[in-house]
Image: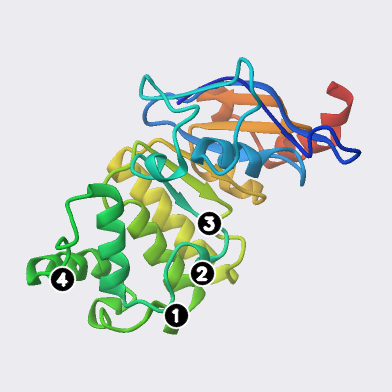
Amino acid sequence: MQIRNLSVTFNRGTEQEFRALNDLNISVMEGEFVFLLGANGSGKSTLLNAIAGVVRADAGNSKLELCGKDITYLSLHKRAKQIARVFQQPADGIASELTVVENFRLAALRSLGRGLRIGTNQAFRNEIRKRVAVLEMGLEDKLDRTAGSFSGGQRQALSLLMATYQKPKLLLLDEPTAALDPKSAETIFRLLCSIVEQQKLTAIMVTHDLRHCVRAGSRIIHLHEGRIAHDVAGEKKEELLLSDLFGWFDTATSNF
């Protein structure tokens, strides 16, 4: 993922005009697992929304490339075939009124686009049963139950499996554990780390839990007022302590 001169301004030309992102330049290499940090209003969610196509970059020099292809003006729908996303609220990533099988069928249609008959045979059900069984939540025997009948942790686990049903070129994780109880949050965090590692995914995860950053991932980007305050990877990232990350938030203002 190549991000060049990315700026996003809301309410342009009004008294409420606010520049959420300021000329960001970020290169995310294939296979990187990036944690995105920052206080509320720092631009984290706006950055994910700009990458996903939910919000548009300001006109001018802003440019987004994915695997060498310009996606700056590509629609949200077309980006969804290449960019998968897991949201903070489990209900946002899964259709509660549909069954587990029906939800996975939607995921297959989005990523594969092979027509309306995909996901209607027994082979598809068997595949979903096998994938869901990996969660060890007993959901493989509940494929015909509506997703809304499950707990938040179960729904978020299913959302993660759906998002990675076909290996996406980029996985966006928007605080996927924030709305869960501590036990479920730990389960989902371990699951997503395992999936990212096994599939060798390129992933960007927004989190407010600094412990995530010292436990996993290959890089940390810290935003402040729409700009990059810190960008640490490799050995320097491995050497970071929780106290270092807390210190970033204490000193961010003085850097601008």
Q: Which residue is mark 4?
A: 125
What amino acid is at disc 2? Answer: Ala
Q: Earlier in the sequence, mark 2 or mark 4?
A: 2
Q: Position of residue 163 (x, y in %)?
A: 37, 53
Q: Which residue is mark 3?
A: 87
Q: Earlier in the sequence, mark 1 or mark 2?
A: 2
> In whole angstroms, how far apart are the C-alphas of marks 1 and 4?
19 Å
Asked if residue 25 lies left or right of residue 75, the reply is right
> In whole angstroms, how far apart are the C-alphas of marks 1 and 2?
8 Å
Q: Earlier in the sequence, mark 3 or mark 1?
A: 3
User: Which mark, by number, is residue 148?
Assistant: 1
Q: Which residue is mark 2?
A: 91
Quadrant assignment, res 8: top right
Query: Relative to residue 246, is residue 252 depicted above or below?
Result: above
> In whole angstroms, how far apart are the C-alphas of marks 3 and 1?
16 Å
Query: Relative to residue 105, is residue 83 depicted above or below?
Result: above
